[in-house]
Image (spheres, grey):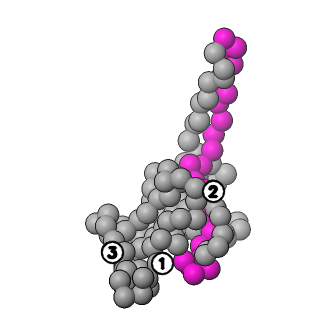
Amino acid sequence: MASCLHPVWLRRRHVTRDLPTTSANVLQLQVITGPSRGDDFYLPRVPIITQAASGTGFRMRRLQFPIRVAFVMTINKCQGQTKSYVGVYLPTPVFTHGQLYVSLSRVGYADAVEVLAPRGITRNVVYPEEL
């Protein structure tokens, strides 16, 4: 049994770390943030049913894990890059002028950004004397 320790983004908005799979149909995961930090849970494959264009009557059903592999980098490292989707984890407010702007502006539209911050808020540090 292989061990994969990759951060994954559970599509239900929980950050987890992938531990060795228990079978081909179940993943053993560990929560790495929030009040359940350190707890293990098992995630089965979920049936995904899609409808084709109207009039064809074609339906597709498949089993898959509702997760995405997450790649982690610092705000400074992502400066100047363009991404299709960004998840920003801010356990504490940013501490330098412009960091929040840099982290939130890596994508072209607001629907492609997800922010995880305590109590759902953070501070944008701006020093007016530097403007």
> Does dot 1 land on a helix, a strand or a loop?
helix
Would you say residue 113 is visible in this rendering?
A: yes
Instruction: Residue 38: say if magenta.
Output: no
Q: Is residue 9 above or below residue 74?
A: above
Name the residue: 66% across, 23% down. Answer: 52
- Identify the residue under disc 2: 84
Q: Are marks 2 and 1 in contact (CB under 8 Å)?
A: no
Q: In terms of sequence position, does the residue under pointer 1 or pointer 3 come before the other?
A: 1
Where residue 96 appears, as percent x and y from the top left, is 44, 85
- Identify the residue under disc 3: 123
> Does dot 3 land on a helix, a strand or a loop?
loop
Q: In terms of sequence position, does the residue under pointer 2 or pointer 1 come before the other?
A: 2
Kind of residue at badge 3: Arg
Nearer to us in this view, 92 or 50: 92
* Residue 18 picture quarter: bottom right
- Identify the residue under disc 1: 99
The segment highlighted magenta reads: 55-77
Kind of residue at badge 2: Ser
Quadrant in which the C terminus is drawn: bottom left
Mark count: 3
Q: Image check: 82 left or right of 14?
A: right
Where residue 129 appears, as percent x and y from the top left, is 37, 88
Quadrant in which the N terminus is drawn: bottom right
Residue 49 badge: none
Q: Are marks 1 and 3 in contact (CB under 8 Å)?
A: no
Residue found at the far top of this picture: 55
